[in-house]
Amino acid sequence: MIKKNCIGILILFSFGLSFYVMTRNSLEATSFGPPEVLLFSIPLTMIIVNSNLLILPKMMKSKESYLRYKKGMENIFLALSLILTILHIGLILTVTGIEFNVILLVPLSVGIALITTANTLPRFRIDLHSSSDLTTSSHHIWNIVIRPFSFPLIIGGLLMLFCVLLPEHLILTGFLTILFCTLLISITLSFKAYKAHSNKIV
């Protein structure tokens, strides 16, 4: 419930910010489009995206499955709402003519996405009940590699957030370096976990 409330606050904040800017500034159409569209496109997108929180429980046949993945899905939608809010603030700064380095939005958004992914993936462990041996095997591999893959994402995501403190000309380079190293370490640790499990079986 707390996460849903946070999502609601982010949506209200985005709409409130748009109304405030529209009433306080005489905005003219820009090359990006009419000001009304620019100010309200992201808040409306947030409503559409988060409406899935109401739709998904009705679409999932098993209530037990929904309750199992509920917290993970709420984490994902909260992170999406936070990322969209950050992008909305950046868009408003651009529309109102305030000088703003758009590159800052990249490490912030991706960093939040990685941290959320790392915290959410372990919740999506799969039950090993399947009629197909191949499916059961693939599910088992997923359960083995999911944790070692997730942990580096937390560290990488946190480091990306600090990229905004770098000099302007180093932000993109620092971000790409951290992203590459994070994915490389995650894949390496996952492969080692899989190999270690395979050796135990042998």
Image (cartoon, helix red, strand yellow):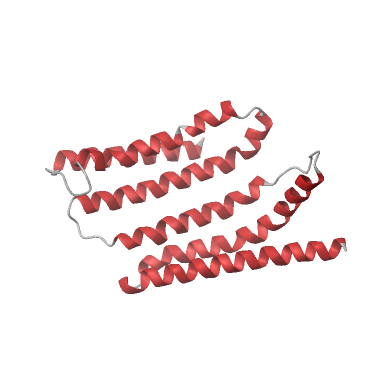
- At a point 64% along the width and 34% down the height, the residue shown is 67
Comparing 103 with 8, the one in front is 103
Q: Quadrant of residue 165?
A: bottom left
Examine the rendered structure and indicate whether residue 147 appears above or below residue 159.
above
Examine the rendered structure and indicate whether residue 141 appears above or below residue 173.
above
Number of marks present in the image shown: 0
Indicate the quadrant containing the C terminus: top left, top right, bottom left or bottom right.
bottom right
Q: Quadrant of residue 190?
A: bottom right
Indicate left or right for 81 with 150 as reference: left
- At a point 38% along the width and 41% down the height, the residue shown is 10
Examine the rendered structure and indicate whether residue 62 appears above or below residue 33.
above
Indicate left or right for 140 with 172 as reference: right
User: Going by the picture, which residue comes out furthest to the right?
Assistant: 202
- At a point 47% along the width and 66% down the height, the residue shown is 159
Q: Position of residue 54 (x, y in %)?
A: 50, 29
Q: Position of residue 17 (x, y in %)?
A: 26, 42
Indicate left or right for 60 with 88 as reference: right
Indicate left or right for 146 with 114 as reference: right
- At a point 58% along the width and 52% down the height, the residue shown is 119
Q: Position of residue 4 (x, y in %)?
A: 48, 36
Q: Position of residue 40 (x, y in %)?
A: 28, 38
